[in-house]
Amino acid sequence: MLAAGIADERFDPESLEAAIRQTLAAWITAVGEDATASENDDSPLVAPALLQPGGPGARTRLVMREPQIEAIQFWRLEADAAPPLARLIVEIHGRRCIRDRDTGEPVSGDPEVMTWFHQFWDMVGDGPAMRPWHLEARVGRDSRDYADAMGCTFTTRRETVQEYRERTAAEPQSDEPGSAAAGEQSPARRFRLSCGFFEHDAYTGGDVEITVRLTATPSWNDAVQLVLPAIYTRLTRSTGQSAWRPTIASLSVLELLNWAGECDP
């Protein structure tokens, strides 16, 4: 951004940050409104596809309660595009559903359940000098609108004794998580992370599973960072190298019981 800003003032990082903050504030206000409150509730700062995932003709609307913006990842800058494009991934936590505008009933999602989900946002730099960047619902190479990503489920739990027996054909040494191996000072707890994902641009998806040693149960952010390399490897192996933008559909963390004598997979 700094390098591009030398020749073009639109790429001033402060200008883009201000636009992102303004857009986020407008979006959070818009999705918090009652789904049947108004037919003309599309803020000029918010792409209509973010409020009406089914399209302009659909009688549905995105509604969120208690939305929390957990992270914004600056994916990449396409300075040479016409118009210039800044790609973002917005990570959100909240009570999310798609409601029927006429009945107010949920069509998908659960307004009572806190969930994690991601949205791919593209900030386009073709506006006036005072505010060059604005949000636009873009389409990928496959012409699919990927502005609205479905909710992601995230669960953490401990393996049961029965699950341990089925996995190892043996009895656990204890019903507590794995203890430190010989010569180790810190507890050697082992976690199995299972993730389902999809990639919009390539019309593909799948699942990955990894086992890691950690000293504590991973948070959502930590778990995502742990599984992303496996997702990228899976996508590259099946479709070749690309600038992947996978969406995580489900992510579960299973803490394994005492595993002394087991071999890592």
Image (spheres, grey):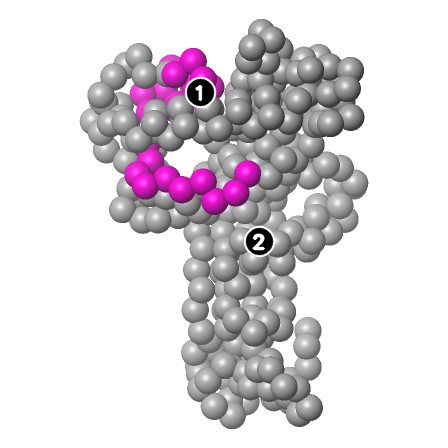
Between 46 and 110, the residue placed more toward the observer is 46
State the quadrant of the N terminus: top right
- How far apart marks 2 and 1 lie (CA) works out to 27 Å
Return the disc, 2 or 1, that comes first in the chain's sequence: 1
Q: What x and y, as percent, mark residue 51?
A: 39, 24
Q: Residue at x 27, y 46 (%)?
A: 112
Q: Which amino acid does label 2 sit on?
A: Val
Instruction: Residue under label 1, please give it.
Output: 46
Q: Residue at x 52, y 71 (%)?
A: 216
Q: Which residue is drawn at 62% across and 58% down?
A: 226
Q: What x and y, as percent, mark residue 100?
A: 28, 27
Q: Would residue 105 be found to the left or right of residue 197 on screen?
A: left
Q: What range of the chain is rendered magenta?
A: 43-72
Instruction: Residue under label 2, please give it.
Output: 224
Quadrant assignment, res 181: bottom right
Q: Do the residues labelled 2 and 1 touch (CB within 8 Å)?
A: no
